Amino acid sequence: MKSIKKRIVITGGEGRFAKSLKKSNQGLNIFFPNKKELNILNIKSIEKYLKKIKPKYVLHAAGLSRPMNIHDKNISKSIDLNIIGTANIVKICEKYNIKLIYFSTNYIYPGKKGNYKELDPILPFNSYAWSKLGGECSVKLYKNSLILRLSMCEKPFIHKYAFSDIKTNFMFHEDFVKILPKLLNKRGILNVGGKIQTIYEFAKKNNPRVKKKSGKKIFPPNPSMSISKLRKII
């Protein structure tokens, strides 16, 4: 694949996913800038770094995620990092015609019936998901882009409890890394995750000691996605 030799920059170069990507990057030529080298809140910083590296692709993984309630407690930080920061990245990618791949979330779907397709109606169920959708809006304006609605987590499953009444498509970071090269030249919106199952079923396979817990007061019952489009690609 020709694209494998092209330069790739990942924002959030010190984040959880970036660490997995460093361990097993599938032969990709990836740069991992820290916040001082590439500050998504400073458009001059973004432009300076991308002009220097001259990447073909930018993986935009930087942003604010955990703890989820931070998006209710500090909406200014949520807006800055997930909406304005993403818009800044879009502006510079558009200026230099760099392919942009944005890491969004399956939580932008309503979460009631599950098996959501990419063009199904969306309705984020918490402030985090709204902030990620805000990022999607700016990315969607730029045609040379791909929005990945991801459902993934670290390996091993780090929590003591897992929800037995919430269905989703979790996959581990390292499993996503394996399929990433096949997605680089796609455009539009793509659901990315694993098999639809409860979070407990997923966690139990990796961590036999994990205990069941109800998540109904925290999450809608079924934010799972259809990954039929992904299967055709990989």
Image: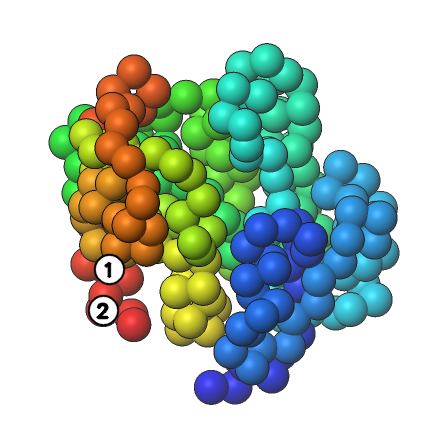
The answer to whether marks 2 and 1 mark residues whose Cβ atoms lie closer than 8 Å is yes
**Going 63% across and 45% down the picture, which residue do you hit?**
62
- The C terminus, quarter of image: bottom left
Q: Amino acid at mark 1?
A: Lys
Q: Which mark is residue 210?
A: none
Measured as percent of width and height from the top left, residue 206 is found at 32, 55
Q: How is the image coloured?
A: rainbow
The residue carrying mark 1 is: 229
Measured as percent of width and height from the top left, residue 170 is found at 32, 49
Q: How many marks?
A: 2
User: Is there any visible trace of residue 138 in the rendered image?
Assistant: yes
Q: Check disc 2 and report its element: helix, strand or loop.
A: helix
Task: Decide which of 2, 107 is in the foreground and name it.
Answer: 107
Which quadrant of the view contains residue 188?
bottom left
Assess disc 2: are there few (<14), some (14-19) or many (≥20) residues with their C-alpha within 10 Å of its C-alpha.
Answer: few
Measured as percent of width and height from the top left, residue 24 is found at 54, 73
Q: Is residue 37 left or right of residue 65?
A: right
Q: Amino acid at mark 2?
A: Lys
Task: Give the Cα distance between marks 2 and 1.
Answer: 5 Å
Q: Is residue 224 left or right of residue 108?
A: left
Q: Residue furthest front?
A: 209
**Going 42% across and 71% down the picture, which residue do you hit?**
178
Measured as percent of width and height from the top left, residue 223 is found at 26, 35
Q: Is residue 97 above or below residue 148?
A: below
Q: Is residue 182 above or below residue 137?
A: below
Task: Decide which of 161, 127 is in the foreground and name it.
Answer: 161
**Going 70% across and 67% down the picture, which residue do you hit?**
31
Q: Is residue 61 left or right of residue 203?
A: right
Q: Check disc 1 and report its element: helix, strand or loop.
A: helix
Q: Which mark is residue 232?
A: 2
User: Is there any visible trace of residue 185 in the rendered image?
Assistant: no
